[in-house]
């Protein structure tokens, strides 16, 4: 099988490097999950080559301003590139003559030596070479002509026609990516042109492609206006269009998409709500803030997590009685709001003490905690953590894996100070906490179990 890394307009040196990194690391369902450790090593070698070429050839261009004809060998009729005339790479292609670039050692691309040493001089001989990195004279796009064969699969960038058993993979120019979001084993790329490209798991229709089939290649989401924002968490997706419309799709078993009904959506569906500034999605309940500062919530409300004064779930966004809101963070069954005055307000489940009031009593309306001078909030699934302006970190709730950073795995129903100071930024994903200090050191905590 030949696995094509194919792009309509090619990718330049820098974007190819990052795009390959994205494919290998972030969208592992495309390549990494299907290859052995040996295969992964070979792909990493290709990435190392690209990194090397990016650094060296960028300096080469800076020095000469163009590809000097006397330092590279031009050829224009390569059998592996059949549709160059239809793309932006209409200029001549060159073998990268690394004799002009100092201290370059490649894992692949070794056939350039055969051209430089005169072993391949005719058009026929050149077209038989397969292990080449080539560059377009006009666009400076770089291509690996044939590819790396790994257990019968060949990975390469090429304009050639796809064989029937080929798996096409769209390559995105990283310079055109406006935003990138991740769900539960799914990936979303919002481009500068307002289009959305997706790949990964799709059991609830969270890719927005009209079905529940998983994807291992990037696919464009159709039937939606140009987008300016995208919000993703687990299996729910919300988008805001350039004309301020809101579309949502994915998991909707509690009405958390705000569409007025229960049932998953596999296609982008327009909400009957406007003037939305930001969306705060979670698994089963979601919040929005409108441009006027008002807060609205919908979804599961079995523990009062919507902050509406009851425990009735909602399938449409309903206004919450709170104002002056700076930020919102959601957990499995609790919600936290940071106000502009630095106070912290919470509602929902306190089963693990995550509300921080010294008890395990649920709340159904947002209630002010004892914490003040709060700079940032970062909820975990069953805990609430905050960063104060003095650089200290405080947390309350579940601590089974050391999420609170207090030196033990005992939970707390009051806010306790973590064993770290001088923090300027806090990150939390599924219990793992990352703290960046004012001297730019990075700390993390969570027990491995």
Image (spheres, helix red, strand yellow):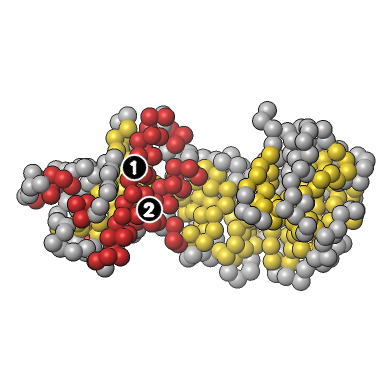
Residue 364 as seen in the image, left or right of residue 74: right
Q: Earlier in the sequence, mark 2 or mark 1?
A: 2
Q: Which residue is identified by label 1?
A: 46
The structure residue drawn at horizontal position 48% and vertical position 65%, both measured from the top left corner, is 193
**Relative depth, front residue between 17 and 330:** 17
The structure residue drawn at horizontal position 70% and vertical position 66%, both measured from the top left corner, is 276
- Image x and y of residue 287, in percent: 75, 56
- SS label for mark 2: helix
**Relative depth, front residue between 400 and 336:** 400
The structure residue drawn at horizontal position 19% and vertical position 61%, both measured from the top left corner, is 92
How many callouts does the rendering have? Answer: 2
Above or below, 365 relative to 147: below
Kindly check if marks 2 and 1 are in contact, taking CB atoms under 8 A apart as contact: no
Q: In which quarter of the view is residue 243 placed?
A: bottom right
- SS label for mark 1: helix
Above or below, 131 relative to 376: above
Tell me how far mark 2 sits from mark 1, CA to CA: 11 Å
The structure residue drawn at horizontal position 13% and vertical position 61%, both measured from the top left corner, is 70
Instruction: Categorize mark 1 by other alpha carbons within 10 Å: few (<14), some (14-19), many (20+).
Output: many
Q: Which residue is identified by label 2?
A: 16
């Amino acid at each position: 099988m030949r696995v094509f890394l194919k792009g309509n307009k090619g990718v330049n040196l820098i974007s190819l490097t990052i795009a390959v990194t994205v494919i290998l690391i972030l969208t592992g369902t495309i390549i990494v999950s299907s290859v052995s450790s040996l295969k992964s090593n070979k792909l990493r070698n290709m990435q190392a080559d690209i990194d090397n070429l990016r650094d060296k050839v960028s300096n080469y261009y800076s020095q000469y301003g163009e590809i000097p004809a006397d330092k590279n060998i031009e050829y224009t009729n390569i059998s592996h590139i059949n549709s160059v005339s239809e793309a932006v790479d209409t200029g001549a292609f060159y073998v990268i003559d690394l004799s002009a670039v100092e201290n370059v050692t490649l894992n692949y691309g070794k056939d350039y030596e055969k051209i430089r040493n005169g072993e391949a001089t005719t058009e026929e001989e050149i077209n038989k070479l397969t292990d080449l990195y080539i560059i377009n004279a006009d666009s400076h796009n770089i291509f690996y002509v044939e590819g790396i064969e790994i257990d019968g699969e060949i990975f390469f960038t090429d304009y050639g026609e796809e064989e029937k058993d080929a798996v096409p993979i769209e390559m995105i120019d990283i310079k055109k990516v406006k935003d990138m979001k991740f769900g539960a084993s799914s990936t979303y790329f919002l481009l500068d042109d307002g289009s959305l490209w997706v790949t990964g798991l799709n059991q609830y229709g969270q890719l927005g492609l009209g079905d529940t089939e998983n994807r291992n290649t990037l696919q464009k989401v159709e039937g939606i206006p140009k987008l300016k924002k995208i919000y993703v968490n687990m299996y729910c997706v919300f988008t805001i269009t350039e004309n301020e419309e809101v579309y949502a799709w994915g998991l909707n078993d509690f009405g958390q998409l705000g569409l007025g009904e229960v049932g998953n959506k596999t296609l982008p569906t327009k909400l009957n709500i406007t003037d939305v500034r930001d969306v705060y999605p979670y698994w089963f309940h979601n919040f929005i803030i409108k441009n006027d500062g008002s807060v609205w919530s919908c979804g599961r409300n079995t523990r009062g997590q919507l902050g509406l004064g009851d425990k009735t779930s909602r399938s449409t966004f309903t206004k919450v009685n709170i104002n002056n809101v700076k930020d919102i963070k959601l957990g499995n069954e609790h919600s936290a709001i940071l106000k502009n005055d630095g106070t912290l307000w919470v509602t929902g489940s306190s089963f693990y003490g995550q509300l921080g009031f010294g008890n395990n009593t649920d709340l159904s309306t947002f209630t002010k905690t004892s914490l003040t001078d709060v700079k940032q909030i970062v909820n975990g699934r069953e805990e609430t953590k905050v960063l104060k302006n003095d650089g200290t970190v405080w947390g309350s709730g579940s601590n089974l894996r050391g999420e609170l950073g207090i030196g033990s795995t005992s939970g707390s129903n009051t806010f306790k100070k973590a064993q770290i100071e001088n923090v300027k930024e806090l990150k939390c994903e599924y219990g793992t906490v990352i703290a960046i200090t004012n001297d730019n050191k990075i700390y993390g905590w969570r027990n491995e179990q």
